[in-house]
Image (spheres, grey):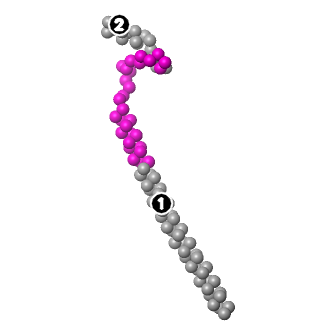
Amino acid sequence: LQVVRYSTLFAGVVYGWYHRRTLRAEHDLHKIDAAKHQREHLIAQAKEAWIKKQTAPLKTADTLITDPEDPNFDLEKLIARWEATA
């Protein structure tokens, strides 16, 4: 009777160890896949942002800012433009 008890206990410990090992391996694979999908998502976002940045109208020095609240507002350039068009 003692042999059966200890054999069952030993078999349960071995099974638990094996089962935990397989669960951990599956979890590690899942983490690797999740990281891969996250990187792909970030790369796609970066590509979209780069395309959006490249297609945005470029701001040149020739652009006239007419908003007096803008820190880049230059009254002299505005008056010179008005004189040139008049």
Residue at image position (62%, 87%) is: 7
Query: Residue 76's spot in the image, x, y percent?
Result: 43, 10
Residue at image position (56%, 72%) is: 20
Q: Residue extending furthest left?
A: 85
Q: Are marks 2 and 1 in contact (CB under 8 Å)?
A: no
Q: Which numbered dot is residue 83? A: 2
Q: Amino acid at mark 1?
A: Ile
Query: Residue 23's spot in the image, x, y percent?
Result: 53, 70
Q: Which portion, as a residue range, is magenta?
A: 42-70
Residue at image position (47%, 60%) is: 32
- Disc 1: which residue: 32
The quarter of the image holding the C terminus is top left
When asked about the image quadrant of residue 63, the answer is top left
Residue at image position (37%, 37%) is: 52
Q: Is residue 81 depicted above or below 13 in this figure?
A: above
Q: Is residue 51 depicted above or below 27 in this figure?
A: above
Disc 2 to disc 1, how far (Cα)? 66 Å
The quarter of the image holding the N terminus is bottom right
